[in-house]
Image (spheres, rainbow, N blue to C red):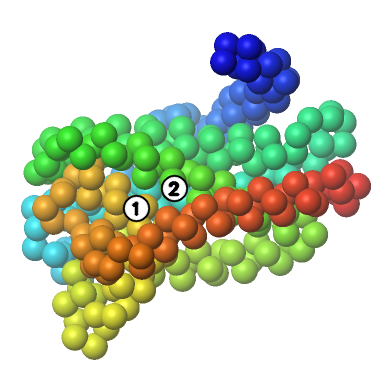
Amino acid sequence: MTELIKRLQKRYHYAIVIFKELVKTDFQLRYQGSFLGVLWSVLKPLMLFCVMYVVFVKFLKFTDGTPTYTISLLCGNCLWGFFSEATSMGMRSVVDRGDLLRKIHFPNYIIVAATTMGSMISLGINMVVVIVFGFFTHAHYTWRVLLVPLSIIQLYLLALGVALLLGTMYVYYRDIAHIWEVALQALFYATPVIYPISMVTQNPHFAWAAKLLMLNPSTQAIMDIRHNLLSPEYVDTVWSIVNTTWIDLIPYVLSVIIIWLGIHEFRKHSSKFAEVL
């Protein structure tokens, strides 16, 4: 076992060094020249949360009547922000780093992985803020918080798979960026971030739509994180809404398929990236 680990470290040592440097550089470049720097990782989601809270909770009265709705809104906003940022920036990363690809030989997937990891670091900072806020907004922390890292890993791998797939297509077709921007907007409204899923389940005409929404892998992962981290009593998951075991597994299976498809397509076309760019 020790010998295997040493062989893996030796084989991927160069890739790991490049990965660390790209993550560090990408994260620094995000806030280069700004006065508040990395503080924007915290301030940006908080400011967006304030806007959503005033518009959707105070004016439009979006609430499920539970004491954890406010912190659930903040958590959902941070998680969706991560997915949106990781997929959008990951999609453009190969093209944006085209000069590097032409000058230095290294596995191309590291560029996408490093970009999405930068978004993951921002999410980590955001989640610390969510947990601290949770102590003042009735969050109920139980042993289920131990399951949260599994759902966050699933959400990260899902975002990485989508970024690899989109990044491959973006090298050849720049229109993908505009299509994904529209698709993200549609996915945002199809994900119960600003509205509670109970608004859909309790509507007799659209109760079926709630089950359909929960089969989206990003929705399932976000709801699982909210459920296990903040409110096991009040936040529904695919297991409580769909309640059919083999159907409940669909979003998890889709996550595996998407990461596999992303890796497969990226590896298939990556050898021609430098030539195309």
On the image, the x and y values in percent for residue 161 come to 58, 50
Q: Can you identify the residue that label 2 sits on?
A: 155
Q: Is residue 134 above or below residue 232?
A: above
Tell me the SS state at disc 2.
helix
Could you tell me how far apart the alpha carbons at marks 1 and 2 are, in whole angstroms?
8 Å
Q: Is residue 116 above or below residue 164?
A: above
Image-based side of 50 in relation to 91, left or right: left
Question: What kind of residue is marked 1?
Answer: Ile
Question: What kind of residue is marked 2?
Answer: Leu
Number of numbered discs overlaid on the protein picture: 2
The residue depicted at 61 percent of the width and 38 percent of the height is 113
Image-based side of 256 in relation to 234, left or right: right
Image-based side of 86 in relation to 246, left or right: right
Q: Is residue 144 visible?
A: yes
On the image, the x and y values in percent for residue 192 come to 30, 64
Corner quadrant of residue 125: top left
Q: Residue furthest right?
A: 275
Tell me the SS state at disc 1.
helix
On the image, the x and y values in percent for residue 114 come to 61, 34
Sort mark 1 into few (<14), some (14-19) or many (20+) by Cα contacts within 10 Å: many
Between discs 1 and 2, the one toward the N terminus: 2
The residue depicted at 42 percent of the width and 55 percent of the height is 252
The residue depicted at 63 percent of the width and 66 percent of the height is 178
Cβ–Cβ under 8 Å for marks 1 and 2: yes
Sort mark 2 into few (<14), some (14-19) or many (20+) by Cα contacts within 10 Å: many
Q: Can you identify the residue that label 1 sits on?
A: 222
